[in-house]
Image (cartoon, rainbow, N blue to C red):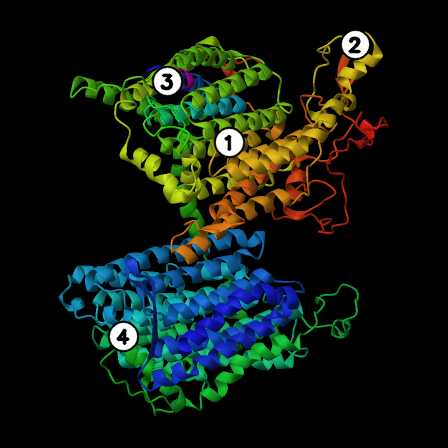
C-alpha cells in the first residue's frame, strides 16, 4: 500500500501541475516539493519493510494478453534510489522557485514531475516491460528538459536523445534476451532464475554486455559520456536533479539491479571496471580543461560515476557497499554543488573561470558551502565523501584477476581522485578566490562606470538555502554511519542475493592502503593548490582539438551523406517518380495474374444481368468529360469537366442501387467544386503546356494502368452469387438495429469503429491544414501582389456603358440576388438538414449527408458577401472538429460502459419515438464535417491573389489593371493563426511557436464576420457593406 | 461488363492527370481515381442486384449488397478530406506548378 500511495501522489502531481502552475506560476515548486515530501512520508513504511528484509510488493494486471503487469517491489535497491529521487527532487524544486524567472514555467514543472514519476517507477518496478517504459520516459523527459532551453539547446538535446535512445534499444534487446532465457518478465524471478546456469554462456555474456551498455549510455560512461556535458544547456535545477542525482543514476541503478544475474559474468566485470576507470580518468582530465564551471561539474559527474561503475563491475560485497554508499554521497554533494553553480551564475552572470569576480567577500556563505561540498567530493576526512571514496578503494582492491589487478585498479582510482581534487580546487578558487577583484560600486549595486569587474546580481536566499541543504545534510551523515549501514545493507543484499554483507563503515580503519592513497591524494592536491596557476595553464593547453559532441556530429554527418544519396533517388521534385513504379508494379501483378488465371483454371462465369443500358450511356458521357478534363488548357474548363464526371458518377452510383452513397456523392461533389473554385482564384488561369512527346508518354502509361484496372474489375467482380455477409445484413440487420436503412445502420452500428476512424481522418485533415499553413510564412502562402507582375489584359466582356461595366465588374450588385435567395433558403436548408439527420436510420440520410446540407448553408453564406470574410467565430472550426470526435468517442464509451462493447448502441423509446445512442454518434459526425467545411471556406477563400484580381480590378483605357494598393483585410496566415489563438490584428510573420512581441490574446479586437446582411436590400436601402 | 470499361476510362484519365506537374491537376486525377475505386468497390457487390438495400422498400431477392455501399460512403468522405487537404497545399505561393528545371524547355 505505501508503494501505491507514493506512486499515486506522484501521478496526482503530474496531473495537477498544469493547474498549480496556472495559479502559482514559478512558485509552483513549493507545491511540488511538498508533494515529494508527502510521497516520501507515505513511502516510509516500505523503507522500514525493506530494511527489515521483507520488501513490500504490489501488483496490478495491466496487459493480460502480453503478461505485462504493473508490478512493484520496494527492495533495498529501490528504496535507496526512491529516497534519492524524492528528497533531492524536493530540494531542487524548492530551489527552482528562486532560480526560475517569473511566469508559468509549465513545461519545466510538468516535465520535472513526469520525470520523477518515471524515475520512481523505474526503480520500484518488478516488471521488465514497465522498467523499459520508465527507462525511456526518463530519457524523453531529460531530452525535453534540455530542449526547452531554446534554440542553443537544440543540437545538444538531439545528441543526448541519440545516445540515450541507443541505450534504450540495447536495453530492449537485453530484456528480450532475459525473457527468452528465463521465461518470465518478473525482475525478482528472472534475475535469480536457475535458468542462467544452464544457459549458453555466449548468450549470457551478450545480454550482460547489452545491459551494461544501456547503463553506460545513461550514466555517461566512456565512450557515451559526451551527452552529459551537452546536457548542461539545460537550466541549472535540471542539471542538479537529473544530471547529478537522478537520470545519470538510473544507469547505475540498472547495473545494481541486474547484478544478481551478471555479477559473476567475466564480460560484465571486465567491461564495467575498464570503462569505469577510463571514464574516471578522462572525466577528471576533461573537467580540468573546462573553464565553464557548469561543464566542469558535468565532467566531474562523469568521472565520479566512473568510480561507481567500476565498483559495481568488481561485484564483491565490499565493492557493492562502496557503490551504494558513493551513490548516496555523490547525489548529496553533487546536486548541492550544481545548485551552487546556479547561485554563482545568478550572482556573477557568468560561469567562466577567470572572469567570475572574486566572490569570497561578497558571498562568504556560498563560499563556505561550496568548499564543504567540494571537500566531500575530493574525499577529505571526516566528510561522507571520504568514507565512500575510501570504501570504493577497498572495493577496487577486490578486482578479479589477481592481486595485481586490484592494485592497478586502486592506483587508477587514486589517480582519478587526484584529478578530482584538482578540479574541486579549480572550482573553489576559480569561482570565489582568484577572480578579478570587485569594486565598491558593484558591492552596492550602483550602475558605476564600466570597470573590470561585472555588475553583480542579487542573491536569492531561497536558492542559497536549498543549494546548501544537501551538502550540509551530508555532514552529520558521516557521523551516523551505523544508521546509514542499515539502509545500505538491504540494497547490497538485493544486489548480491545469498550474501550477508557486514560492512564496517568508519572514519578510521587504522593504517590501510586506502588511507595511504587518501593521504597521497591530499598531499598531491595541496601541491596542486599551491601551484595552481601553472597547473591550470597546463590543462588549458591540454585540450583535445575535438570533443565528444564533435565526434557525434561527425558520425551524424557521415550517416547523412549516404542518406542524401538515397534521398536524391526518392526526392519529391516530381510526383511521377513516386507514382510510376508503384502503379507499374500493380499493373504487372494484375495483368500477369489475370492472364495466369485465364490460362490456368479459367474464370468463373459472370452473373446474369450485370449490365444495364444506362451504364453504356454513362460510359460515353464520362469518357467525354474525362477527355475534356484531361486536355483543357483553361483551369476553369477542367473544373467544369471534372464536376461533370462527378455528377455522372453520382448517377452511376444511383443506378447501382445506393441511395445513401448517391446523396453523399452529390453533396460532396458540390462542396468540392466550390472549394476548387476558391483555390482556383489564386492560381494561374491556365495550365502549363508541355511538349507533346512528354504528354504522349504519360498518356500511354496511363492507358496501361487504366486497362489493367478495368481488367481487374472485369475479371474479379460480378462472378459470384451474393455473399453470405450481404445476405446477413439484408435479412438480419433491420431486426437487430431497429432501422430499415441498412447502409446507415452498418455505418453507425455494425461497423461504427470504421466510421469513427473516417470521422477522425476527416477532422484531422482540417487540423492538418491548419498545422501545415501555420508553419509557412505569410509571404510564401500569399506572395505580395506587387511581387507578381501581371500583364494588363483585355476584359473578358467588352461593355460600352459605364453602368453596365459596373454591373459586371463591381461585386456588390452581383451578390444581391444570392443574398436575397440566401435569406429564404437558410431556414429551408436548416430544416432539411434536421429532417435528413432524423430519418437517417430508416431512410436515405444520416449525419454525414445532413452535415453536408448544413455546410451548404456555410457555402451560400460565404458566397453571398462582396469580399472574402471569415464565417463564424475564428476558433469555432477547430472546436467543432474536436467536439465532433469527442462526442463520437464518448458515445462509444457509453456503449462500452452500459453494453460492454465500445460503440455498442443503446436503444430506447421516448415520446413514442425510437431513439438510439448511434444518433449521438451521428451528431459527432455532423460537427466534424461542419468544422472541416468551415476551415476550407475560411482558409482557402482569402483572396489577395497574385494572379487574379478577385474584385480588385480597375478598368483603365479599356485594359484591366490589378489594383495592388488595395490590401485585403485578412491574409491566409492570419486566418490560420486566428483559428488557433483567436482574433488578431495581422498575420504572424513567424513559424509556429515563435510568437511576435505584439501578440496577445486579448479578445478586444472585433472584426466584421459574415451574417446574412440582406435586410437593407430587401427594404430598398443602400447596402451596409462596403464592397465596391 | 460495362462498369469495368468505365473504371478503365476513369483510371486512365486519373493517372494521366496525376502525372502532370500541376498540383491542381494531380488533385483532379486523384478525384477521378477515387471515382474509379468506388465503382470497383460497388462492383464487388455484384451489379446484377441493384435494388436499394432498405428494409420494406425492396425485396431481399433484388436488393444490392449493402456492405460495399457502406465502404464507398466512408471512402467518399475520406476522399473529400484528402482532396481539401491537397488543394490547400496547392495555393502556397499562388503557383501550383511543381519545381521546374529551366533546361526542360517547357513553355507556359
Q: Earlier in the sequence, mark 4 or mark 2?
A: 4
Q: Secondary structure at mark 1?
A: helix
From the image, state whether disc 3 or disc 2 is nearer to you. Answer: 3
Front-lying residue, A446 or A178: A178
> Label 4 crowding class (10 Å Cα cut-off): few <14, some 14-19, many 20+?
many
Would you say residue A951 is visible in this rendering? no
Which numbered dot is residue A611?
none
Confirm whether circles 4 and 2 share one chain.
yes
Measure how far apart labels 4 and 1 are at the Cα level: 65 Å
Would you say residue A252 is visible in this rendering? yes
From the image, state whether disc 1 or disc 2 is nearer to you. Answer: 1
Instruction: Give the percent coordinates (x, y) of residue A384.
Output: 44, 84
Which numbered dot is residue B80?
1
Measure how far apart labels 4 and 2 are at the Cα level: 95 Å
Confirm whether circles 1 and 2 share one chain.
no
Confirm whether circles 1 and 3 share one chain.
yes
Instruction: Give the percent coordinates (x, y) of residue A19.
Output: 60, 65
The residue wearing badge 3 is B3
The residue wearing badge 2 is A958
Residue A191 occupies quadrant: bottom left
- Residue at 42% in and 15% down: A698
- Residue at 74% in and 50% down: A1003
Instruction: Give the percent coordinates (x, y) of residue A486.
Output: 36, 87
> Label 1 crowding class (10 Å Cα cut-off): few <14, some 14-19, many 20+?
many
Measure how far apart labels 1 and 3 are at the Cα level: 23 Å
Q: Secondary structure at mark 2?
A: loop
> Which residues lie in the magenta part?
B4-10
Q: Earlier in the sequence, mark 1 or mark 3?
A: 3
Q: Is residue A472 shown left or right of residue B39?
A: right
From the image, state whether disc 1 or disc 3 is nearer to you. Answer: 3
Amino acid at each position: 500500500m505505501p508503494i501505491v500511495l507514493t506512486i499515486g501522489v506522484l501521478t496526482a502531481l503530474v496531473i495537477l501541475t498544469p493547474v498549480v502552475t496556472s495559479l502559482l506560476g514559478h512558485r509552483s515548486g513549493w507545491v511540488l516539493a511538498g508533494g515529494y515530501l508527502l510521497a516520501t512520508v507515505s513511502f516510509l513504511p516500505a523503507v522500514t519493510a525493506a530494511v527489515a528484509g521483507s520488501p513490500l510488493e504490489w501488483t496490478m494486471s495491466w496487459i493480460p494478453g502480453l503478461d505485462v503487469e504493473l508490478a512493484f517491489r520496494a527492495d533495498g535497491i529501490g528504496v535507496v534510489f526512491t529516497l534519492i529521487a524524492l528528497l533531492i527532487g524536493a530540494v531542487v524544486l524548492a530551489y527552482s522557485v528562486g532560480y526560475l524567472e517569473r511566469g508559468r514555467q509549465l513545461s519545466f514543472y510538468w516535465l520535472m514531475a513526469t520525470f520523477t514519476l518515471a524515475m520512481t517507477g523505474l526503480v520500484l518496478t518488478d516488471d521488465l516491460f514497465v522498467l523499459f517504459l520508465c527507462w525511456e520516459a526518463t530519457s524523453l523527459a531529460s531530452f525535453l528538459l534540455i530542449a526547452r532551453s531554446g534554440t542553443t539547446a537544440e543540437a545538444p538535446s538531439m545528441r543526448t536523445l541519440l545516445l540515450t535512445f541507443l541505450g534504450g534499444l540495447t536495453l530492449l534487446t537485453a530484456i528480450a534476451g532475459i525473457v527468452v532465457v528465463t521465461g518470465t518478465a518478473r525482475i525478482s524471478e528472472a534475475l535469480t532464475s536457475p535458468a542462467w546456469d544452464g544457459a549458453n554462456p555466449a548468450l549470457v555474456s551478450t545480454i550482460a554486455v547489452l545491459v551494461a551498455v544501456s547503463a553506460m549510455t545513461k550514466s555517461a560512461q566512456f565512450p557515451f559520456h559526451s551527452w552529459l556535458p551537452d546536457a548542461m544547456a539545460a537550466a541549472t535545477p535540471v542539471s542538479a536533479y537529473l544530471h547529478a542525482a537522478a537520470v545519470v543514476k538510473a544507469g547505475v541503478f540498472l547495473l545494481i539491479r541486474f547484478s544478481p544475474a551478471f555479477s559473476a559474468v567475466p564480460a560484465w566485470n571486465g567491461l564495467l571496471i575498464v570503462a569505469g576507470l577510463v571514464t574516471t580518468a578522462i572525466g577528471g582530465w576533461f573537467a580540468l580543461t573546462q573553464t565553464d564551471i557548469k561543464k566542469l561539474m558535468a565532467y566531474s559527474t562523469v568521472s565520479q560515476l566512473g568510480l561507481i561503475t567500476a565498483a559495481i563491475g568488481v561485484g564483491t560485497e565490499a565493492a557493492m557497499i562502496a557503490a551504494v554508499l558513493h551513490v548516496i554521497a555523490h547525489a548529496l554533494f553533487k546536486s548541492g554543488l550544481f545548485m551552487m553553480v546556479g547561485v554563482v551564475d545568478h550572482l556573477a552572470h557568468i560561469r567562466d573561470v577567470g572572469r567570475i569576480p572574486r566572490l569570497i567577500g561578497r558571498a562568504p556563505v556560498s563560499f563556505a558551502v561550496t568548499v564543504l561540498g567540494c571537500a566531500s567530493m575530493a574525499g577529505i576526512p571526516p566528510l561522507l565523501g571520504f568514507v565512500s571514496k575510501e570504501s570504493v578503494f577497498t572495493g577496487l582492491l577486490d578486482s578479479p584477476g589477481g592481486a595485481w589487478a586490484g592494485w592497478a585498479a586502486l592506483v587508477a582510482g587514486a589517480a582519478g581522485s587526484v584529478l578530482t581534487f584538482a578540479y574541486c580546487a579549480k572550482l573553489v578558487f576559480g569561482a570565489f578566490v582568484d577572480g578579478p577583484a570587485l569594486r565598491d560600486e558593484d558591492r552596492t549595486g550602483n550602475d558605476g562606470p564600466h570597470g573590470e569587474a561585472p555588475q553583480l546580481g542579487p542573491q536569492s536566499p531561497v536558492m542559497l538555502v536549498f543549494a546548501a541543504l544537501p551538502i550540509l545534510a551530508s555532514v552529520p551523515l558521516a557521523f551516523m554511519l551505523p544508521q546509514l549501514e542499515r539502509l545500505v545493507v538491504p540494497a547490497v543484499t538485493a544486489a548480491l542475493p545469498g550474501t550477508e554483507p557486514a560492512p564496517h563503515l568508519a572514519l578510521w580503519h587504522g593504517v590501510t592502503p586506502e588511507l595511504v592513497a587518501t593521504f597521497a591524494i591530499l598531499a598531491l592536491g595541496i601541491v596542486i593548490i599551491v601551484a595552481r596557476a601553472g597547473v591550470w595553464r597546463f590543462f588549458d593547453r591540454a585540450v583535445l582539438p575535438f570533443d565528444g559532441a564533435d565526434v557525434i556530429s561527425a558520425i551524424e554527418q557521415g550517416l547523412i551523406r549516404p542518406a542524401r544519396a538515397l534521398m536524391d533517388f526518392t526526392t519529391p521534385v516530381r510526383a511521377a517518380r513516386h507514382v510510376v513504379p508503384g502503379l507499374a508494379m500493380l499493373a504487372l501483378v494484375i495483368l500477369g495474374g489475370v492472364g495466369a488465371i485465364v490460362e490456368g483454371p479459367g474464370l468463373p462465369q459472370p452473373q446474369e444481368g450485370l449490365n444495364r443500358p444506362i451504364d453504356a450511356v454513362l460510359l460515353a458521357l464520362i469518357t467525354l468529360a474525362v477527355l475534356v478534363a484531361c486536355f483543357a488548357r483553361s483551369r476553369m474548363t477542367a473544373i467544369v469537366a471534372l464536376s461533370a464526371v462527378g455528377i455522372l458518377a453520382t448517377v452511376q452510383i444511383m443506378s447501382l442501387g445506393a441511395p445513401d452513397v448517391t446523396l453523399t456523392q452529390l453533396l460532396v461533389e458540390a462542396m468540392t467544386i466550390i472549394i476548387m473554385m476558391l483555390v482556383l482564384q489564386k492560381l494561374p488561369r491556365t495550365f502549363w503546356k508541355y511538349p507533346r512527346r512528354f504528354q504522349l508518354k504519360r498518356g500511354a502509361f496511363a492507358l496501361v494502368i487504366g486497362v489493367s484496372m478495368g481488367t481487374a474489375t472485369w475479371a474479379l467482380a460480378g462472378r459470384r452469387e451474393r455473399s453470405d455477409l450481404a445476405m446477413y445484413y439484408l435479412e438480419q440487420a433491420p431486426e437487430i438495429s431497429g432501422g430499415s436503412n441498412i447502409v446507415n445502420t452498418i455505418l453507425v452500428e455494425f461497423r461504427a469503429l470504421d466510421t469513427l476512424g473516417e470521422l477522425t481522418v476527416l477532422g484531422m485533415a482540417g487540423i492538418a491544414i491548419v498545422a501545415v499553413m501555420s508553419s509557412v510564412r505569410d509571404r510564401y502562402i500569399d506572395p505580395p501582389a506587387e511581387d507578381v507582375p501581371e500583364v494588363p489584359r483585355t476584359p473578358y466582356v467588352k461593355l460600352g456603358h459605364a453602368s453596365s461595366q459596373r454591373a459586371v465588374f463591381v461585386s456588390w450588385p452581383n451578390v444581391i440576388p444570392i443574398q436575397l435567395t440566401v435569406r429564404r433558403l437558410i431556414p429551408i436548408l436548416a430544416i432539411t438538414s434536421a429532417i435528413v439527420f432524423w430519418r437517417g436510420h430508416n431512410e436515405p440520410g444520416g449525419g454525414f449527408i445532413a452535415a453536408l446540407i448544413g455546410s451548404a448553408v456555410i457555402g451560400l453564406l460565404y458566397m453571398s458577401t462582396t469580399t472574402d470574410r471569415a464565417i463564424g467565430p475564428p476558433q469555432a472550426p477547430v472546436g467543432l472538429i474536436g467536439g465532433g470526435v469527442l462526442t463520437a468517442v464518448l458515445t462509444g464509451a457509453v456503449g462500452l460502459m452500459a453494453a460492454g462493447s465500445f460503440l455498442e448502441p443503446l436503444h430506447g423509446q421516448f415520446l413514442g419515438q425510437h431513439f438510439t445512442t448511434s444518433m449521438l454518434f451521428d451528431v459527432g459526425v455532423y460537427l466534424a464535417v461542419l468544422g472541416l467545411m468551415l476551415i476550407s471556406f475560411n482558409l482557402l477563400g482569402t483572396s489577395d491573389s497574385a494572379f487574379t484580381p478577385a474584385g480588385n480590378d480597375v478598368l483603365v483605357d479599356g485594359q484591366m489593371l490589378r489594383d495592388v494598393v488595395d490590401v485585403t483585410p485578412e491574409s491566409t496566415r492570419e486566418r490560420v493563426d486566428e483559428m488557433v489563438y483567436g482574433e488578431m490584428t495581422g498575420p504572424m510573420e513567424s513559424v509556429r511557436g515563435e510568437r511576435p512581441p505584439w501578440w496577445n490574446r486579448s479578445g478586444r479586437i472585433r472584426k466584421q464576420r459574415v451574417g446574412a446582411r440582406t435586410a437593407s436590400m430587401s427594404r430598398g436601402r443602400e447596402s451596409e457593406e462596403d464592397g465596391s | 461488363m460495362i462498369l469495368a470499361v468505365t473504371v478503365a476510362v476513369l483510371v486512365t484519365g486519373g493517372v494521366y492527370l496525376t502525372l502532370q506537374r500541376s498540383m491542381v491537376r494531380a488533385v483532379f486525377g486523384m478525384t477521378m481515381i477515387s471515382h474509379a475505386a468506388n465503382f470497383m468497390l460497388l462492383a464487388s457487390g455484384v451489379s446484377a442486384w441493384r435494388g436499394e438495400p432498405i428494409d420494406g422498400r425492396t425485396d431481399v431477392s433484388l436488393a444490392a449488397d449493402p456492405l460495399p455501399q457502406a465502404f464507398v460512403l466512408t471512402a467518399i468522405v475520406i476522399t473529400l478530406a484528402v482532396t481539401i487537404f491537397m488543394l490547400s497545399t496547392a495555393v502556397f505561393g499562388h503557383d501550383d506548378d511543381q519545381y521546374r528545371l529551366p533546361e526542360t524547355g517547357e513553355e507556359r
